[in-house]
Image: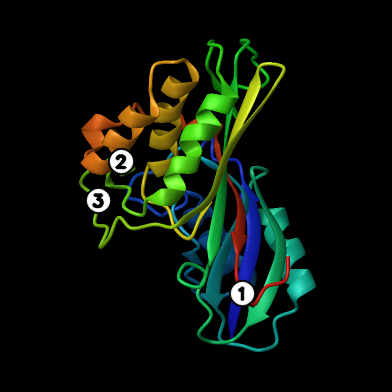
Amino acid sequence: MRYFIQLSFDGTDYHGWQIQKNAHSVQAELNAALNTVLRQPVETTGCGRTDTGVHAREFFVHFDYESDALNLEDALHQLNCILPKDISLQKIYPLHAKAHARYDASSRTYEYHLHKLKDPFQNHYSAFYPYDLDADKMNELSSVLMEYNDFSCFSKTGTQNLTNICKITSANWKSDNGNTVFTIAADRFLRNMVRAIVGTLVQAGRGKLSEEQFRKILNSKDRKEAGFSVPAEGLSLVRVIYPYLIP
């Protein structure tokens, strides 16, 4: 039987979702908990990978279990008791054998949070950026993203991506009392892509980047032409959509 798990995690103390040698990961914690509760070796596959310090309000994984007698409610309760406080499971779904947490996702949505005033209570979930930002100007340039599909200029170099083609379906900024949120949705994202987009567009918000310059960056397909990558703590995966799961 194949199962999906819907979960969320605070990525502050993790080197991302994916298991790595000599590093603390969310996947390692979840696999260990599943092995304990199900009493057999279990390997999970996530809907994507997150960088060190990045959070997920909604994340999905799939795993196979050699039995059709899994009590979903009991398993969910036991797993949440074992897992650390910064990982929470919301639901376990039984699905068809070919369901895939990564490849079947039709859309992913990220949020990036910035705060202008220094605030120790926002440090883990928002990046401190002490400058005035013009949200209207950043939204103007964000709309340009929908005209492109090759985002090599925002991709971390040295990755093993087969393609840098993505379809961005929405991208917008909202500001309120010094707090600014960037929300972006696409069919897929490249490594470091959202943080590089934010680091580029805030320059427009400060009046330092024109639409012509932004298009030049996109057309260059060169990471060195784009802006800096903003800190990881402001980034959260907030929604993942599958055609066979009802929100």
User: Where is residue 52 drawn, in percent x and y?
Assistant: 43, 39
Kindly state the secondary structure of the residue where label 3 is placed.
Answer: loop
- Residue at the far front: name it: 212
Quarter of the rendering occupied by the C terminus: bottom right
Quarter of the rendering occupied by the N terminus: bottom right
Identify residue for label 3.
159
Kindly state the secondary structure of the residue where label 1 is placed.
Answer: loop
Disc 2 to disc 1, C-alpha distance? 31 Å
Mark 2 or 1: in front is 2
Q: Mark 2 Cα within 10 Å, few/some/many (few <14, many 20+)?
A: many
Q: Is residue 24 visible?
A: no
Kindly state the secondary structure of the residue where label 2 is placed.
Answer: helix
Earlier-in-chain disc, 1 versus 3: 3
The residue closer to the viewer here, 27 or 227, is: 227
Earlier-in-chain disc, 3 versus 2: 3
Disc 1 to disc 3, C-alpha distance? 28 Å
Q: Is residue 215 above or below residue 242?
A: above
The residue closer to the viewer here, 120 or 28, is: 120
Task: Evaluate if marks 1 and 3 touch, with contact meaning CB atoms under 8 Å apart.
Answer: no
Q: Would you say 41 lies left or right of 34 here?
A: left
The residue closer to the viewer here, 110 or 70, is: 110
Amino acid type of the residue tagged 1 in the rendering:
Pro
User: Where is residue 108 drawn, in percent x and y?
Assistant: 54, 56
User: Where is residue 98 drawn, in percent x and y?
Assistant: 50, 85
Q: State the residue at coordinates (61%, 88%).
A: 67
Identify residue for label 1.
243
Disc 3 to disc 2, C-alpha distance? 19 Å
Q: State the residue at coordinates (53%, 74%).
A: 63
Identify residue for label 2.
218
Mark 1 or 3: in front is 1
Amino acid type of the residue tagged 3 in the rendering:
Thr
The residue closer to the viewer here, 144 or 113, is: 144
